[in-house]
Image (spheres, grey):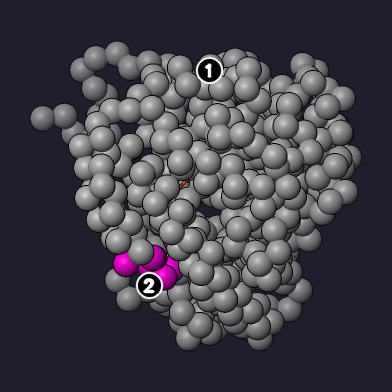
Amino acid sequence: MTEPGASPPFTLSREAHSIRRSMMRDLIAITARPGIISFAGGLPAPELFPVDAWQAATDRVLTREGRAAMQYGPPYLPLQESIAALMAQRGASVEADQVFIVTGAQQGLHVAARLLMDPDSPVVLDRFVFTGVRQAFGGESRLVREVDNGPTGTLDGDGLGAAFDARPSPRVIVVVPDFHNPVGTSLSQNDRRLVLQVAGQHDAAVVEDDPYSWISFDGRLSRALVADAPERVLYIGSFSKIVAPALRLGWMIAPRPVIAKLRVIKESVDLETSGLTQRVAGEFLASGALEPHLGKLRRAYAERCAAMCAALERWMPAGTRWSRPDGGMFIWVELPDGHDTLAALEPAVEAGVAYVPGQAFASRPAARTMRLNFSNATVDQIGVGVALLGEVLTHHTRLAA
Ligand SMILES: Cc1ncc(COP(=O)(O)O)c(C=O)c1O
């Protein structure tokens, strides 16, 4: 038997050789010890999953069209229509045939990268970015130009300009305009306009990766970039955070000329997204179950985020800065000089609390940063966990000094 980690008795592709495990997966495995208060994963609150509504929708679909629901089939038009109606809430005027169903936003990122990128194509990414974006767009031989982002949420306009002025010119910029993972911030209207303007000047595509915008705490929805530049933007939405990740269901809005290409690329990955899941999601949306569910998520997450901000205020070492999100699931913390969040993780886990060191989202050292998730812990756990974290961080720097 081959030992794990030993070379296999056959030749691997160059891609397989160069591909690396996401540091985040390893960290989340370490932090998933029983009894630990974890701010590490990007997990929604399980007690809020709409299990009953989903079950009722499944029963209705199977009773009505069991056989068709279990067959191969084209994208499910009623779901595409409901998604077009959701996009109208974001200012985007979209026909059902422009809604391209994908098996989760991660698949959307993957097919978008295959549509737009050659092995040596430059791409513009945030300095701190969801690992799945980096995996899809930042392959080994690709030139990644990074634009700084951090707790204030202001777009680094000079960095953006420099990324596009360098040669060869980037073809793609990937943005997460609302409640960014990992930094938690949203782009201002001006920053959104600037992204579209700069991409337009350089004939680049904009990938708008948007799993979080419907979780705005006050229920106000931003205008999607794709609403203002439908010919330039590939929009990617997801049901993972607004219904449940296990659906593995998302959607793209793309200019009509590229939809046919996307279809062929997606076919090579998984033929099609589960027709059963598409039908149940269509039924769930048509029954009006999403809006009250979003109301519950918004109230609960707003309360948890406020509890986390208050606890950070109380327990973090002096000079610490953090983002103050108006939605989503994450807070980004930047500690003062001398802190090392990677080194402090083990003592934190020993003390009973976990987070993701910012380094997991970066290509360069980022020792003073960390991502905290607030959706997957109760208000009480947040109070206790942040107090433990404050104690560990204060003690740890004293030891390191
Ligand atoms: C910014 C971002 N994009 C994409 C995804 C992937 O989402 P999905 O579960 O729909 O594949 C995530 C998941 O956490 C994310 O945070």
Magenta range = 42-52
The amino acid at mark 2 is Glu
Q: What element carries label 1?
A: helix
User: Quarter holding the N terminus?
Assistant: top left
Residue at 39 percent across and 19 percent down: it is 268
Q: What element carries label 2?
A: helix
Badge number at residue 47:
2
Residue at 35 percent across and 49 percent down: it is 280
User: Quarter holding the C terminus?
Assistant: bottom right
User: x and y percent of residue 136 in the render?
Assistant: 53, 32
Whether tag 2 and tag 1 are in contact, CB under 8 A, the answer is no
User: x and y percent of residue 297 in the render?
Assistant: 52, 69
The residue beneath circle 1 is 260
Between residue 288 and residue 154, name the one nearer to us.
288
User: x and y percent of residue 318 in the render?
Assistant: 73, 78
Q: In this view, does 377 lie above or below 85?
A: below
The amino acid at mark 1 is Ala
